[in-house]
Image (spheres, rainbow, N blue to C red):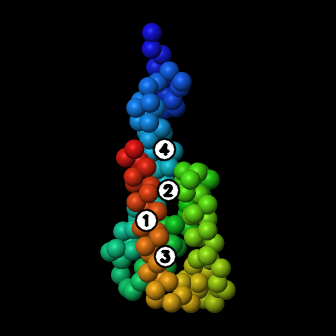
């Protein structure tokens, strides 16, 4: 007799392939907000107006700053996101744009490109984890 778990979690009686699918489904449901914010940030970085600094600032201010890692990201991505967020807000605030804008404006062009790539890489990780 096989016992099935009808919820989103897995149980010890499920075969490994079923467990993997359920874990992926649960991840997709639990972290939709974080995924949506990263998806919108990636879109801003690819299709937004202005130069790289402007697009990175917009992606951070309008999307990424609203992510609460403990609620919106899988455990394996939280530290990486917190480190990114911490670095992007460490500069002094000189204008109405806030810490993100001030920090990003002080960055060199190559550093901005690296952070854009990092945001896109994290988005792809989230997307791949959702697909299971």
Residue ID at (43%, 73%): 117
Residue 45 showing in the rendered view: yes
Q: Earlier in the sequence, mark 3 or mark 2?
A: 2
Q: Earlier in the sequence, mark 4 or mark 2?
A: 4
Residue ID at (51%, 29%): 10
**Relative to residue 31, is residue 49 depicted above or below?**
below
Q: Secondary structure at mark 3?
A: helix
Task: Report how far apart the C-alphas of labels 1 and 3 lie in the structure.
Answer: 10 Å
Residue 72 showing in the rendered view: no
Residue ID at (34%, 74%): 46
In depth, the one of 126 and 39 nearer the eye is: 126
Q: Earlier in the sequence, mark 2 or mark 1?
A: 2
Q: Position of residue 104 (x, y in %)?
A: 54, 84
Task: Report how far apart the C-alphas of labels 3 and 4 lie in the structure.
Answer: 25 Å
Q: Which one is in front in this view, the residue at disc 2 or the one at disc 1?
A: 1
Q: Secondary structure at mark 4?
A: helix
Q: Which residue is mark 1?
A: 121
- Tell me the number on the disc at residue 27: 4
Left or right: residue 105 compared with residue 93: left
Q: Which residue is mark 2?
A: 34
Task: Report how far apart the C-alphas of labels 4 and 2 lie in the structure.
Answer: 11 Å
Residue ID at (44%, 57%): 125
Single out the residue that lies furthest toward the front.
16
Give neighbour class at mark 2: few <14, some 14-19, many 20+ (Cα, 10 Å).
many
Q: Position of residue 89 (x, y in %)?
A: 62, 77
Q: Secondary structure at mark 1?
A: helix
- Tell me the number on the disc at residue 115: 3
Count the marks: how many?
Answer: 4
Task: Report how far apart the C-alphas of labels 1 and 4 lie in the structure.
Answer: 18 Å
C-beta proximity under 8 Å, tags 1 and 3: no
In depth, the one of 115 and 104 nearer the eye is: 115
Left or right: residue 11 compared with residue 21: right
């Amino acid at each position: 007799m096989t016992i099935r778990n009808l919820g989103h979690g897995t149980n010890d009686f499920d075969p490994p392939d079923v467990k993997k699918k359920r874990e992926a489904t649960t991840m997709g449901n639990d972290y939709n907000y974080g995924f949506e914010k990263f998806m919108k940030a990636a879109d801003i970085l690819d299709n937004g107006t202005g130069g790289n600094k402007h697009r990175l600032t917009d992606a951070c201010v309008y999307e990424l700053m609203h992510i609460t890692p403990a609620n919106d990201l899988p455990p394996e991505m939280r530290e990486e996101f917190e480190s990114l967020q911490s670095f992007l807000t460490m500069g002094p605030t000189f204008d109405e744009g806030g810490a993100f804008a001030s920090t990003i404006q002080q960055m060199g062009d190559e550093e901005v490109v690296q952070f854009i790539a990092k945001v896109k890489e994290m988005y792809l990780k989230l997307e791949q984890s959702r697909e299971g």
